[in-house]
Image (tube, coloured by chain):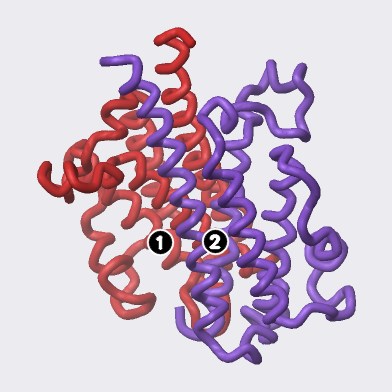
Chain colours: A purple, B red
């Protein structure tokens, strides 16, 4: 096999992962545009998170990839306190569902622009939360693995969202 | 970069995906061993699937990878009618939760043994549900992409299972 073909394999596989990520993003976007805005203030199951909280949570978690991948500062650091450090309803509501939806789309565009410019070497390089020494011992602590884990995290919450109305 | 290093990259990335798959498997196994057997007969949310149905569903879906990857026949073809073609409670109960748990472990071991012996080329080859002609047009219809999609499918249902008791 030619050298170029082998490089192409790694690139192809990274492409599959990015695509899996995009598919989960799309499902979230579709879910939050298919019902009237009021519905998203409902709990996904009795006593459980509201759909709107889960959207804020997904934004806050995914936004963490910006500093983790060394792209810069979080776009929406104010979501952290409400949607990451606290459970639903613990902090008083300040974002409308439309605002969260706009944040979601802006975040996805920002992340995608970065992802599209990354080489396989960059994907397999360490993220900023692991030291060079620890990374030498555990090379799986790379950016691509974070993206994989963010992808399954998204699927996990989509499964829950779908319990609310149809699914 | 050396040829061997480049091959290693593709192998490393396949390893990350297999690991993500295993992690989801482990979460399902842990979930179904942490509570008394009775609990799994409960619905994950009012009027929704019972936890036991979701376990049968995950086995039936994952079992489909055996013929899809050309490994042979499904281990548990009798689950198809109950857990794939019909919704929960449509077909009368024939499997105990302990039986399903044993199926689950046996299926994971069988799949894992096959996965561990596969090369990157084999992962990137077509699965049996796509013709050579279609595969030439859409090379993403490969086995690795199926495994990725089964991984997010599992995460989707784990998110739902976790709504039942704690989580």
Look at the image and tell me in which quarter the N terminus of chain A lies.
top left
From the viewer's perspective, is residue B45 above or below residue B77? Answer: below
Residue A87: x percent and y percent? 81, 68
Left or right, B93 with reference to B12: left
Circle 1 marks a residue in which chain? Answer: B
User: Which residue bears the numbered disc 2?
Assistant: B37
What residue is rendered at 46% in x and 37% in y? A14
Q: Is residue A83 among the parts visible in the rendering?
A: yes
Q: Secondary structure at mark 1?
A: loop
What residue is rendered at 54% in x and 71% in y? A29
Q: CA distance from mark 2 to mark 1?
A: 9 Å
- Ranked by sequence position, the earlier of labels 2 and 1 is 2
User: Which residue bears the numbered disc 1?
Assistant: B96
What residue is rendered at 33% in x and 56% in y? B61
- Residue closer to the observer: A6 or B17: A6
Q: Secondary structure at mark 2?
A: helix
Residue B44: x percent and y percent? 56, 73
Circle 2 marks a residue in which chain? Answer: B
Residue B143: x percent and y percent? 30, 40
- Residue closer to the observer: B35 or A101: A101
Left or right, A154 with reference to A137: left
Judge the density around disc 1: few (<14), some (14-19), many (≥20) Cα neighbours within 10 Å.
Answer: few
Specify the label residue B74 is tagged with: none
From the viewer's perspective, is residue A128 above or below residue B149? Answer: above
Tell whether label 1 touches label 2 (CB within 8 Å).
yes
Judge the density around disc 2: few (<14), some (14-19), many (≥20) Cα neighbours within 10 Å.
Answer: few
Quarter occupied by residue B80: bottom left
From the viewer's perspective, is residue B129 above or below residue A159? Answer: above
Residue B167: x percent and y percent? 69, 62
- Residue closer to the observer: A42 or B59: A42
Left or right, A162 with reference to B83: right
């Amino acid at each position: 096999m030619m050298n170029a073909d082998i490089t192409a394999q790694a690139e192809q596989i990274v492409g599959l992962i990015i695509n899996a990520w995009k598919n989960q993003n799309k499902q979230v976007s579709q879910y939050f545009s298919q019902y009237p805005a009021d519905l998203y203030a409902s709990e996904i199951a009795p006593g459980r998170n509201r759909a709107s909280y889960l959207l804020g949570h997904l934004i806050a978690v995914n936004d963490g990839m910006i500093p983790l991948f060394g792209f810069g500062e979080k776009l929406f650091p104010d979501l952290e306190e409400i949607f990451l450090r606290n459970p639903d309803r613990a902090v008083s509501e300040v974002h409308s569902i439309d605002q969260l939806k706009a944040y979601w789309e802006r975040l996805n565009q920002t992340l995608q622009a970065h992802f599209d410019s990354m080489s396989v070497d960059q994907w397999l390089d360490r993220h900023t939360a692991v030291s060079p020494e620890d990374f030498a011992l555990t090379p799986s602590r790379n950016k691509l693995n974070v993206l994989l884990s963010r992808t399954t995290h998204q699927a996990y919450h989509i499964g829950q969202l779908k319990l609310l109305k149809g699914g």
